[in-house]
Image (cartoon, helix red, strand yellow):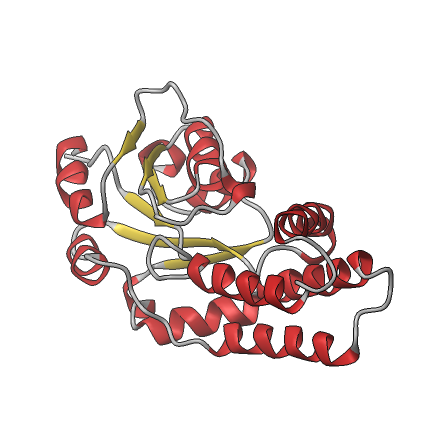
Amino acid sequence: MTRKLQTIGFDADDTLWHNERFFKLTQDRFEELLSDYTDKSLLHVRLIEAEKRNIGHYGFGVKGFVLSMIETAIDVTEGAVPGQVIRRILDAGQDMLAHPIELLPHVQTTIDALAQSHRLVLITKGDLLHQERKLAQSGLGELFDDVAIVSEKTVETYLTVFGRHSGGVEAAMMVGNSMKSDILPAVNAGSWGVFVPHDLEWELEKAPPPQNPRYHAIADLGDLPALVAEIG
């Protein structure tokens, strides 16, 4: 008997390992560096605006974030930002790229268990080299049957990636912490979407949940095997 669910896709950052907290720490450092020039709340708004503008140019990840911080620093100081501040922003970005990978709770046991019964696919956004390095350091790489590092997650992304595997998108599930990128387009493509909330949520990834029977939310990845077994 063929399983209803054959392929399980996982987001990487803040689903399998910590990520957003390093962006938050770096943003706090950035606000301190520019505290003599502008109010922190205004700086936060200006940085978010820069990130929105620049996603189409730089994509997602640390490098685009650093360039957006530099652009914001130049703008809020009207070009007067000292070179040493730019240097410290670059140093902060390099620290982010070098930070060791720390798996979230229940990730190892859940991935180990599901890899025995289902085809596992990693679908993540971000810089190619950085995401490849994080996957290698995570120790999970050999458990995934396919890895897709993409510039954006859309309906077409899931149709393409899941379409490479038997059963296609209708026999696939996407698991992640971003309603906008992991859940909505996957469900709209015809797969199951399982939302796993994270304490820190990037503002640009927020969205209301879908009203669809293929949408589920769980407290953490420890609850995923039971849901997978229930679907069959």
> Residue 2: x and y, percent?
19, 36
Residue at 72% across / 50% down in the picture? Answer: 50
* Most foreground residue, 6 or 166: 6
Quarter containing the N terminus: top left
Residue at 43% across / 42% down in the picture? Answer: 178
Residue at 13% across / 32% down in the picture? Answer: 230
Residue most toward the front?
Answer: 36
> Residue 113: x and y, percent?
15, 56
Q: Is residue 113 above or below residue 136?
A: above
* Most foreground residue, 171 or 191: 191
Quarter containing the C terminus: top left
| 18 horizontally vs 184: left or right | left
Q: Is residue 85 above or below residue 67?
A: below
How many labels, in total?
A: 0
> Residue 167: x and y, percent?
33, 37
Give the quarter of the image for residue 67. Answer: bottom right
> Residue 156: x and y, percent?
55, 37
Give the quarter of the image for residue 60. Answer: bottom right
| 2 horizontally vs 202: left or right | left
Residue most toward the right?
Answer: 79
* Most foreground residue, 99 or 165: 99
Residue at 52% across / 70% down in the picture? Answer: 130
